Amino acid sequence: MILHPGILALLGGSFIVVVMLLYSSYLGIRILRRWDINSSSEEQLSLERRTYLLSTMMSFVLAFEVLSIFLFIYTADDLHRQFVGAMCATGSLNANPVGWYVLYLGILIFFLSSLWIGINYIDQRTEGFPFVRFKYGFLLVITPVLIVKTYLQARYFLGLNPNIITSCCGALFSGEGRGLSSSLSSLPRFL
């Protein structure tokens, strides 16, 4: 593995995010099962307090995930110096093909996390918490996606070998290359 500050930040942050998401998912299941806004029982009051704590914690955790896609792209671009033949992030991602899956999942998580943060913002400012069940159900959907992304990200960074020769984006996007990207880039211009 290449010891790069971006790699260490991404891996460390992702593992902390997964631990916090697993805990939040456990509490989210309890909230989904026992939430009753019309009740004034001690359990409901406890759930309402935990909802505030959990929502605040998840907002920060998912904000980190929103920003981590930019850190991943920056790190992949900065790593190109480590590989022969790489001139940009494309070459770094080609050094271990798992990197492309991490990028795609990161983009998906960017939108899912942004959506959750927006729903949470609306829910906390609305009387009666109308989206509590929805946002914790949605959190249960986001959690496995983040776990898969963390696993693939660890595989990508741990599988990087600076002794391999990788292709640059010029070879991938040229008309003579193979694949969808070269086919699209070799289409005639209509201007």
Image (cartoon, rainbow, N blue to C red):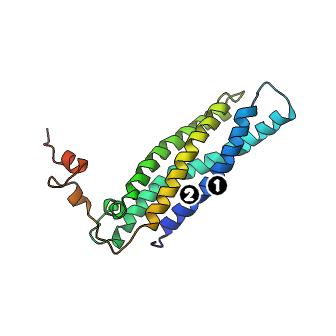
Residue 13: x %, y % from top left: 57, 59
Q: Is residue 182 left or right of residue 142?
A: left
- Of the two numbered discs 2 and 1 on the same chain, state the one appearing first in sequence: 2
Residue 104: x %, y % from top left: 41, 49
Residue 191 seen in render: no
What's the residue at 71%, 43% (across, down)? Answer: 27
What's the residue at 33%, 71% (across, down)? Answer: 83
- In front: 97, or 57? 97
Residue 147: x %, y % from top left: 55, 51
- Identified by mark 1, the residue type is Val
In the image, is residue 25 above or below residue 166?
above
Q: Are marks 2 and 1 in contact (CB under 8 Å)?
A: no
Q: Secondary structure at mark 2?
A: helix
- Identified by mark 2, the residue type is Ser
Look at mark 1 in the image and give the residue it sits on.
19
Residue 127: x %, y % from top left: 71, 27
Q: Quadrant of the C terminus?
A: top left
Residue placed farthest to the right in the image?
42
Q: Is residue 99 left or right of residue 88?
A: right
Instruction: State the mark number for residue 14.
Output: 2
In the rendered picture of this protein, how many numbered marks are placed on residues? 2
Q: Residues within 10 Å of mark 2 (few under 14, many from 20)?
A: many
Q: Secondary structure at mark 1?
A: helix
- In front: 180, or 185? 180
What's the residue at 62%, 58% (across, down)? Answer: 16
The Cα–Cα distance between marks 2 and 1, rounded to whole angstroms, is 9 Å
Residue 32 seen in render: yes
Residue placed farthest to the top in the image?
38
What's the residue at 60%, 54% (across, down)? Answer: 17
